[in-house]
Amino acid sequence: MHAIIARTQLSPNVTRLDVAAPRIAEIRRPGQFVIVRRTEGAERIPLTIADANPDAGTLALVIQAVGKSTRELVALQPGDAIRDISGPLGVPTELIETGRALCIGGGVGTAVVHPIAQGLKRHGVQVVSIIGGRAKEWVIFESELHRLGEVLVCTDDGSYGRKGFVTDIARDVLAAGGIDIVYAVGPVPMMRATANLTRPLKVRTIVSLNPVMVDGTGMCGGCRVSVGGETRFACVDGPEFDGHQVDFELLGDRLGTYRAYEQQSLTRHEEACRIGPQP
Ligand code: NAD
Ligand code: FES
């Protein structure tokens, strides 16, 4: 069992849970993730390790509450516990050793960018972050990223920072030159748009993919993606890949495959919550 140590609401549907997982906290590296099961038999949910404190033995897990299982997870409070946490899983981020890196986080993807920026800073790389959200209250990890370098903020509605998408700011930063590598994490259209910006400039671009995952061990094939025309499994070969090689259209299609089932499950969950426990 992994105790919840702290719970923080980061945005209207994004929650941070600090959980006890000392062995993972000690060995995890940027870019890696865990798979959690809230209770025995519960759905397995892949979650980014947004931060870790090896001294306290805790992991910061960031959860976007979009379906039944994630809503149940974010309902946990300090003192509750998560049954299983397996990890760290996935290939650690390929971090450059010198130069200047542009880290781009769209919405909840900013939580994935944070440990990458931490790793880059530790290497002595100059970090510039661009982060964006739908509106001011959707912008997350701003102060944490400020500790690691310059941060440029935007919102879709202009309520905070520059009005526009993260790619609007990225276009200007890239045009000014001096960027050695881009790390971009967020919605699929955002990662695709970023890769389209950097491809003609020949700036290496790493994206973190979020296909449906089941076992997280390369056995079920659920997380397959196409990169450079080859099938790769995000759980064991990724989740980070060369953004110029990713087939984003296929990824978007596959993410949509289960949307109707997810909605059904959520509707049943909402009805059950409304009715309350039955005798
Ligand atoms: P969102 O839809 O609120 O968008 C966040 C920001 O991304 C926007 O404010 C904008 O700046 C940018 N953006 C959105 N669409 C864009 C476009 N077409 N072109 C350029 N920029 C665009 O994001 P959200 O609700 O926080 O959702 C985040 C998404 O990221 C979810 O779909 C989730 O599944 C995914 N996600 C990805 C990872 C990963 O590892 N890749 C991890 C967690 C979540
Ligand atoms: Fe099953 Fe990756 S989650 S192969």
Image (tube, grey):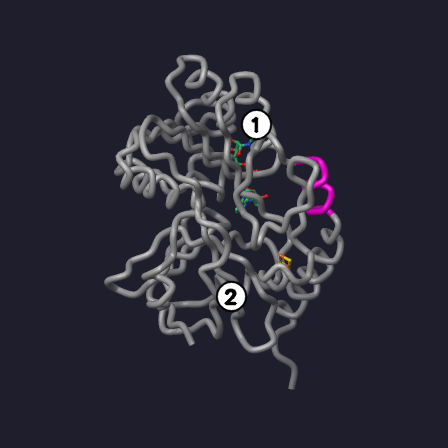
Where in the image, quadrant-wise, is ligand 2 located?
bottom right
Percent from the top left, x then y, of residue 78? 36, 68
* For residue 85, side relative to residue 247 (left or right): left
Q: Which residue is mark 1?
A: 195
Q: In this picture, is 71 found above or below 126?
A: below
**What's the mark number on residue 84?**
none
Of discs 1 and 2, which sits in the foreground?
A: 1
Q: Which residue is mark 2?
A: 36
Q: Is residue 175 magenta?
A: no
Q: Residue furthest left?
A: 55
Q: Please tell me which residue is depicted at 59% across the width and 63% down the height of the picture.
A: 69
Percent from the top left, x then y, of residue 65? 54, 55
Residue type at mark 1 is Ala
Q: Residue furthest bottom?
A: 279
Q: Please tell me which residue is depicted at 72% across the width and 46% down the height of the picture.
A: 254
Percent from the top left, x then y, of residue 52? 33, 56
Q: Which residues are magenta?
A: 247-256
Q: Secondary structure at mark 2?
A: strand
Q: Please tell me which residue is depicted at 49% across the width and 42% down the height of the picture.
A: 109
Q: Residue furthest top?
A: 176
Q: Is residue 250 magenta?
A: yes
